[in-house]
Amino acid sequence: MTNKFSATLNLNNTGSVTCRACNFEINPSCETWKEKAILSEKPMDGAGGSPYSLSKKVLLRQFFCPNCGYLLDTETAIAGDPFLNDVVKC
Ligand SMILES: [Zn+2]
């Protein structure tokens, strides 16, 4: 049985987190999955137009499926900040 964990991730009955696009097992346990994803970090400077042009320290983090490249999640952070983790209680 598979449950929708987010718009891009599923949580199956064994507690693993999978990509909703290709069903690839991103993390076999219900612990944080972001360390297993492909990470891209880019400065937010100008990324969204003029509202973000003043801060060069704020980063846009994008997390992609390591199998199909599907965009799984995004967050903003300062360099070196820990990931914002979605904790799944199994
Ligand atoms: Zn995938």
Image (tube, rainbow, N blue to C red):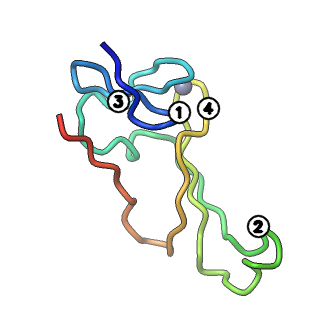
Residue named by callout 2 = 48
CA–CA distance between discs 2 and 1? 23 Å
Residue named by callout 3 = 17
**Residue 27, position in %: x, y?**
33, 31
Front label number (4 vs 2): 2
Q: Amino acid at mark 1?
A: Cys
In the picture, the quarter occupied by the C terminus is top left
> Is ligand 1 closer than 8 angstroms to the Cβ of mark 3?
no
Mark 1, secondary structure of its residue: loop
Query: Sequence order check: which comes first, mark 3 or mark 1?
Result: 3
Residues tagged 1 and 4 counted as in contact (Cβ below 8 A): yes
Mark 4, secondary structure of its residue: loop
Residue named by callout 4 = 69
Q: Amino acid at mark 3?
A: Val
Mark 2, secondary structure of its residue: loop
Q: Residue 65: which numbered mark, if any?
A: 1
Badge 2 local density, few (<14 within 10 Å), some, or many (20+)? few
Where is residue 49, by image quadrant?
bottom right
Query: Sequence order check: which comes first, mark 3 or mark 2?
Result: 3
Pick out the residue farthest to the left: 90
Above-or-below relation of 10 to 43: above
Q: Amino acid at mark 4?
A: Gly
> Is ligand 1 closer than 8 angstroms to the Cβ of mark 4?
yes
CA–CA distance between discs 4 and 2? 22 Å
Q: Residue at x 54, y 18 (%)?
A: 22
Pick out the residue farthest to the right: 49
Query: Sequence order check: which comes first, mark 2 or mark 1?
Result: 2
CA–CA distance between discs 3 and 2? 30 Å
